[in-house]
């Protein structure tokens, strides 16, 4: 694994809210996965996240981060719970989170309330996919707003998760072995 130095993301510096869901039992695995967690990204993704946070602020919104860098040991746990490559990357190939170039986010309004995205984070079902036509217009608007912010900042989306964004050439980045997040 590569030795790329991760950049730490803080609420104060970036103007975001950080809620690392995998440090709680309220997640896909149903257990605390991160025993210790720091929100961090590869420097290239960190620069894009900084832009995204600024764009959200320009719209009177705040980015909320659910996950960023993820050790491959955590990926193994998620794969054991849901070995469906549409939603969880096979740890043998590595997750883009484990490369530090993927981030899971949503938007908060000016009162700190999450915008309605139609499903919760880590809701691994078709309603969580982008390009759904059967969701209410407000949900469509919110998802498109998030999509626009993240694309404009330099990220790309994936079809199956409205919350997941990554760098366009993410597979070109090496896996990162960092102790910032302990499983």
Image (cartoon, helix red, strand yellow):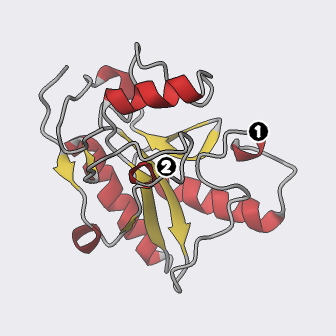
Residue under label 1: 126
Q: Quadrant of residue 2?
A: top left
- Please determine whether, in this image, residue 38 is positioned above or below residue 28: below
Label 2: element kind: helix
Q: Where is residue 122 in the image (x, y as percent from the top left)?
A: 59, 46
Q: Answer with mark 2 or mark 1, whichever residue precedes in sequence.
A: 1
Q: Distance between the residues labelled 2 and 1?
A: 22 Å
Q: The C terminus lies in which quarter of the figure?
A: top left
Mark 1 residue element = helix
Q: In which quarter of the image is residue 160?
A: top right
In this rendered view, identify the residue nearer to me: 90 or 35.
35
Instruction: Describe residue 152's horizontal placement relative to residue 47 as left or right.
Output: right
State which quarter of the image contains the N terminus: top left
Whether residue 172 is situated above or below residue 66 in the rendered picture: above
- Residue labelled with disc 2: 151
Residue 89: image x %, image y %?
A: 50, 24
């Amino acid at each position: 694994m590569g030795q790329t130095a991760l950049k730490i993301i803080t609420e104060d510096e970036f103007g975001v809210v950080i809620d690392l869901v995998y440090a709680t039992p309220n997640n896909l695995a149903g257990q605390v996965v991160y025993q210790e967690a720091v929100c961090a990204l590869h420097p290239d993704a960190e620069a894009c996240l900084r832009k995204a946070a600024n764009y959200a602020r320009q719209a009177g919104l705040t980015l909320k981060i659910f996950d960023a860098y993820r050790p491959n040991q955590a990926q193994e746990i998620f794969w054991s719970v849901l070995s469906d490559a549409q939603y969880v990357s096979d740890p043998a190939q590595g997750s883009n989170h484990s490369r530090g170039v993927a981030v899971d986010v949503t938007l908060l309004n000016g009162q700190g309330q999450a915008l309605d995205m139609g499903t919760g984070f880590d809701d691994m079902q078709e309603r969580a996919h982008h390009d759904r036509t059967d969701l209410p217009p407000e949900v469509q608007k919110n998802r498109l707003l998030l999509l626009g912010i993240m694309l404009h900042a330099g990220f790309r989306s994936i079809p199956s998760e409205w919350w997941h964004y990554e760098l366009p050439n993410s597979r070109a980045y090496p896996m990162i072995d960092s102790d910032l997040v302990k499983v």
